[in-house]
Amino acid sequence: MPKLVATHEVDDVAHWLASPKRAEVFAGIVTNLTTYVLPGDSNRVALSMEVADMDAFDAVMKSDAGAAAMKHDGVRPETLQMYVEG
């Protein structure tokens, strides 16, 4: 099961941290979903997770549901970077 780290900017860190959307949209696809905040920077955040099915993960990221979840969470999609355990 590959490990993945995603970094991006958000509009409101407190809202992003409190949101249930990422857990809802990735249910059954990822485990050990953990949130991180960059100290001293008001909008940089990260996620780490283990991905059970990379094809399903990619499909969610490209789906309308994935886009809606990012919008709800205030994610700035143009800042999204993903790192896969190598």
Image (cartoon, grey):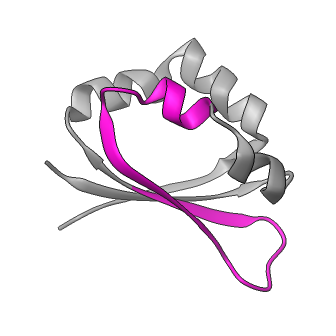
- Residue at the image point whose x is 75% and y is 31% from the top: 71
- Image x and y of residue 75, in percent: 72, 44
User: As drawn, which residue projects farthest toward the left?
Assistant: 1
Q: Return the residue found at the far top.
A: 64
Is 16 rendered above or below residue 35?
above
Residue 22 drawn in magenta: yes
**Residue occupying the point 84% across, 71% down:** 42
- In this view, the residue in front, 50 or 66, is 50
Nearest the eye: 34 or 3: 34
In the image, farthest residue toward the bottom = 40
Does residue 41 appear left or right of residue 46 in this picture? right
The residue located at (29%, 24%) in the rendering is 56
Q: Nearer the viewer, residue 15 or 7?
A: 15
Residue at x 68%, y 21% (from the top left corner): 68
Number of callouts:
0
Quarter of the image with the C terminus is: bottom left
Q: Is residue 73 magenta?
A: no
Left or right: where does residue 12 sit relative to residue 75? right
Q: Quadrant of residue 26?
A: top left
**Horizontal relation, residue 80 to residue 61: left or right:** right
Read off the magenta span: 21-48
Left or right, residue 70 beside residue 72: left
Location of residue 80 in the rendering, given as x and y in whole percent from the top left corner: 58, 52
Q: Is residue 25 above or below residue 63?
A: below
Residue 85: percent from left, percent from top: 23, 64
